[in-house]
Image (cartoon, grey):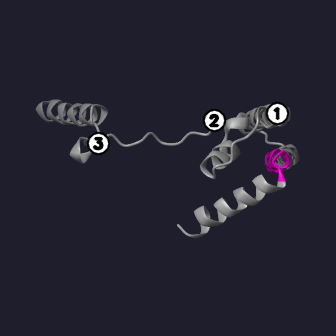
Amino acid sequence: MKSKLLLSTLILTLVSALAFAQPPAPRGGEVPPPAPRHMGGPRGDIYRMCRNAGIYLTDAQLEEMGQISYEYELKINDLEYQKRSIDYKFKLEREKIDLDLNLIKDLISQRKDLEKEIDYLRIEKDVTVLDVLTEEQLNQLNSYRMRYYYYR
């Protein structure tokens, strides 16, 4: 009885210590910068890269980029909704006792097709957004990307 009480106290202490543990404070009193987050829309990665490259976009370009991003995000969100629906059907089918392997194979195929379409739409969106830039801006962006990605 005493050993069970001691063991349960030890486990409770270990679990509570892990729950209240905190990472060490940074040295020198400096606060580390927050992790970058994808902001989506026209002010996502392309916008940030343009700013870092010294390219200032016009209001018309920003509006066009926003419209392009909005249209593609609608399509992508619709496909992701369909993918979640397939995942739900897949989960329900897996929980059954008498599995229909053909249905599972078909669901996996449908999910992979949707994933391919989502990936393609994301790349197509990036290319379409880049088409908004002028030739001079594209050259400046490519120059920046070469310096930033290949010489770091």
The earlier-in-sequence mark between 2 and 1 is: 2
| Left or right placement of residue 20 versus residue 97 in this view | left
Q: Which residue is mark 3?
A: 30
**Label of residue 60 in the image:** 1
The earlier-in-sequence mark between 2 and 3 is: 3
The amino acid at mark 3 is: Glu
Q: Which residue is mark 2?
A: 39
Membership of 128 in magenta stretch: yes
| Left or right placement of residue 132 versus residue 149 in this view | right
Residue 134's x, y, as percent?
83, 50
The amino acid at mark 2 is: Met
Q: Residues within 10 Å of mark 3 (few under 14, many from 20)?
A: few
Q: Residues within 10 Å of mark 2 (few under 14, many from 20)?
A: few
> Which residue is depicted at the point 52% across and 66% down?
152
- In three-dimensional space, the C-alpha distance between marks 1 and 3, rounded to whole angstroms, equals 40 Å
Extreme residue toward the bottom, this view: 151
**Quarter of the N terminus within the rendering:** top left
